[in-house]
Image: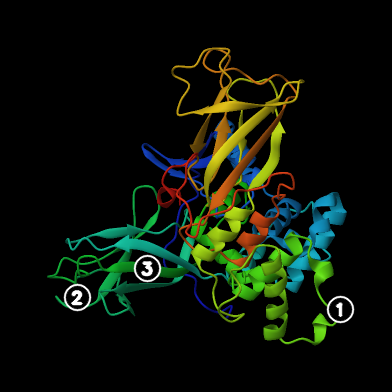
């Protein structure tokens, strides 16, 4: 879009919503009763910046006007689009050195405004707008209920919306409808919509009443695409960035705009498995001269010799199925130390299952005499201070957390006790991208854990979460 384009559609005030931290989940509260929790994409690292910013913004009103530095914004943006996947050594860098590397990597993605700049300077409105202007947010708004004057919220978080388009699928595919300021001039069958602002300064898409503007047919899918522009104030605050990046649709769109993930094809998954299982040495030296089909055939044979036979059918560029993914995961259970006990009450540890169902879960605690398995319970209601048990809960997104008791209801693991888990993973309801599988394969495969021979068909879960379809 040219600079001369007028950015006018919906303009918002400066009001900052109060924020709260619920466990490890960041939530924004729009007074008096509206609560929207931060969600994480599968395999998305816990965003420590959002958690800290939310806590500060909630506890100290003065912090809400503190500008965010280029250093903090560049670091948050780099983590969001996962530049560490391309340059893992970035996690070892600190200070100016880290900023320079991140700015260089962002420049290669088309964000070249931070190169050779002072990391301690505040982020300007123009710089934020430059990052956002290339990002089209695509948001599924929901389904039509067939009633008059229905509306659907947009996750704009007080930012200006422009280039907005709304699409309705009444059974024949998505069709763009026309935006109007109001429905005064609309006829009964006119496919019009308007954008309004609610009492919380959030934007929403509104439809007509069948007399003034058409009502989408019951069950019709509604989606929108739009861009965001900054507020009128020149200063960009930490609270503002935290609120902005809490928008799951925006975060996903930023990643897709600047660092899109490749789809998980058979060839990409086979290549990832070869590397994860350290089978590289079995590959021929002339791989660079091989075609995709030849390379896939060799990788498939190597994996088949190691018990993974899902690559015997289909070409290298066809999509992997959920059933095939589940079969591989079944044969390679996870075993890892998830943390060290601090001795605190109600402490928890994240399992990082990232949208996969966990089952056959076992937890072991080493309080100095070797690892001992503790028992999984649904709650601590019937637990005593000496009961060696734990509870597994899901957060607001797709992640499982393992909780211990408070020394009244459930024993607290002794200070400095390692906590180890072993579990199996069930395929996700939705197929993931290559990036998601890279995250899953970062889990160390248990070399000493010999899995039982699987039956011809995938067995139902026997522990952990009972119904795979509910864990999405």
Residue sitting at the far left: 211
Q: Residues within 10 Å of mark 3 (few under 14, many from 20)?
A: many
Q: Residues within 10 Å of mark 2 (few under 14, many from 20)?
A: some
Closer mark to the observer between disc 1 and disc 3: 1
The residue where tag 1 is placed is 285
Would you say residue 304 is visible in this rendering?
yes
> At x 42% / y 63%, what residue is drawn?
10
Image spot of residue 405 (x, y percent): 56, 21
User: Dots 2 and 1: beta carbons under 8 Å?
Assistant: no
Q: Is residue 427 left or right of residue 43?
A: left
Q: Distance of mark 1 from mark 3, alpha carbons?
A: 49 Å
Q: Residues within 10 Å of mark 1 (few under 14, many from 20)?
A: few
> At x 42% / y 68%, what residue is drawn?
9
Image spot of residue 239 (x, y percent): 59, 45
Q: Distance of mark 2 from mark 3, alpha carbons?
A: 21 Å
- Residue nearer the viewer, 285 or 238: 285
For marks 1 and 3, the one nearer the N-term is 3
Check residue 186 in the rendering and tell me which mark sits there, or answer none. Answer: 2
Q: Distance of mark 2 from mark 1, alpha carbons?
A: 68 Å
Closer mark to the observer between disc 2 and disc 1: 1
User: Dots 2 and 3: beta carbons under 8 Å?
Assistant: no
């Amino acid at each position: 879009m040219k600079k001369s384009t007028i950015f006018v559609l919906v303009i918002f005030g400066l009001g900052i919503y109060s924020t709260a931290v619920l466990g490890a989940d960041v939530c924004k509260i729009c007074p008096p009763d509206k609560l929207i929790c931060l969600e994480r994409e599968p395999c998305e690292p816990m965003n420590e910046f959002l958690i800290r910013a939310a806590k500060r913004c909630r506890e100290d009103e003065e912090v809400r006007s503190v500008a965010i530095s280029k250093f903090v914004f560049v670091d948050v943006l780099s983590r969001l689009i996962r530049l560490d996947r391309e340059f893992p050594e970035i996690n070892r860098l600190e200070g100016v050195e880290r900023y320079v590397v991140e700015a260089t990597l962002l420049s290669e993605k088309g964000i070249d405004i931070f190169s050779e700049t002072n990391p301690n300077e505040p982020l300007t409105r123009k710089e934020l707008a430059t990052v956002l202007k290339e990002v089209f947010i695509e948001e599924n708004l929901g389904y039509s209920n067939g009633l008059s004057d229905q509306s659907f919220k947009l996750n704009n978080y007080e930012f200006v919306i422009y280039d907005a388009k709304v699409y309705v699928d009444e059974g024949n595919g998505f069709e763009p409808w026309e935006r109007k300021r109001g429905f005064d001039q609309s006829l009964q069958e006119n496919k019009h919509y308007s954008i309004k602002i609610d009492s919380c300064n959030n934007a929403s898409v509104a439809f007509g009443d069948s007399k003034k503007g058409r009502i989408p047919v019951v069950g019709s899918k509604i989606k929108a695409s739009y861009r965001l522009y900054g507020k009128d104030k020149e200063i960009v605050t930490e609270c503002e960035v935290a609120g902005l990046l809490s928008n799951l649709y925006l975060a996903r769109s930023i990643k897709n705009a600047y660092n899109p993930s490749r789809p998980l094809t058979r060839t990409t998954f086979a290549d990832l498995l070869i590397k994860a299982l350290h089978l590289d040495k079995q590959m021929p030296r002339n791989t660079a001269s091989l075609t995709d089909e030849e390379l896939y055939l060799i990788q498939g044979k190597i994996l088949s010799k190691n018990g993974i036979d899902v690559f015997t059918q289909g070409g290298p560029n066809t999509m992997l199925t959920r059933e095939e993914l589940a079969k591989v995961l079944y044969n390679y259970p996870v075993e890892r130390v998830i943390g060290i006990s601090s001795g605190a009450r109600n402490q928890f540890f994240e399992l990082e299952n990232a949208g996969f169902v966990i089952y056959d879960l076992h937890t072991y605690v080493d309080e100095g005499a070797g690892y001992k398995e503790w028992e999984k319970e649904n709650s601590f209601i019937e637990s005593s201070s000496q009961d060696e048990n734990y509870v597994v809960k899901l957060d607001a997104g797709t992640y499982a957390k393992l909780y211990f008791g408070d020394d009244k209801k459930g024993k607290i693991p002794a200070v400095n006790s390692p906590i180890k888990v072993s579990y199996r993973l069930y395929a996700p309801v939705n197929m993931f991208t290559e990036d998601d599988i890279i995250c899953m394969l970062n889990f160390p495969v248990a070399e000493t854990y010999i899995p039982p021979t699987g039956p011809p068909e995938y067995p139902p879960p026997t522990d952990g979460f009972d119904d795979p379809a509910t864990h999405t």
